[in-house]
Image (cartoon, grey):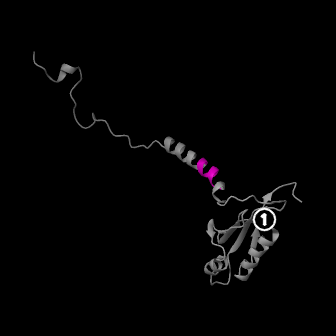
Amino acid sequence: MAMGAMSSGRPPRRGRGSRRTPIAEINITPMVDVMLVLLIIFMVTAPLLTAGVPIELPDSRAEALEQQQDQITVSIDSAGYIHIDDEPVPLGAFAERLAAIAPTAEKKPLVTLRADRSLEYARVMAVMGELNNAGFNSISLVTNSSEKAP
């Protein structure tokens, strides 16, 4: 008995039509699932990235202002140490760092000042005075929003 093409029970292939064509469609459902998970992760972590120095802010009933693109964040922690954009500044070098940051253009960037609630008023005013001497006249004070604040 000769083993021919018909021994497997399939007819022999003839021409181009009998080959399988590759699937040219991309299934986007898994991609949409991954993108949705990434979007949720970024939405949850984005507010956590704005505050780098741990500071207990005072309470206020004032409404929040919009953030500007060109701004500098100055933080004063409970020990009185100063940070510029989350980078610690050595004692006595604050004025020099401000002079290096100050742009030569007429419009100075907005300074947001985050001070711990346990700090003395004189310490905060001294930092604001240094900012004013360096030419930063637009200073925003950062607080927690609260209904029971005075």
* The magenta stretch spans residue 137: no
On screen, 92 above or below 25? below
Residue holding disc 1: 119
The kind of residue tagged 1 is Leu
Measured from the top left, where is residue 13 in percent x and y? 22, 31
Residue at horizontal 56%, vertical 48%?
38
Residue at horizontal 64%, vertical 83%?
105
Direction from residue 43 to residue 114 in the image, left or right: right
Quadrant of image for the C terminus: bottom right
On screen, 93 above or below 15? below
Quadrant of image for the N terminus: top left
On screen, 2 above or below 124? above
Farthest residue, direction left: 1
Magenta segment range?
Answer: 40-46
Q: Main secondary structure of the magenta part?
A: helix
19 and 57: which is toward the camera: 57
77 and 35: which is toward the camera: 77
Measured from the top left, where is residue 40 in percent x and y? 61, 47
Measured from the top left, where is residue 15 in percent x and y? 22, 36
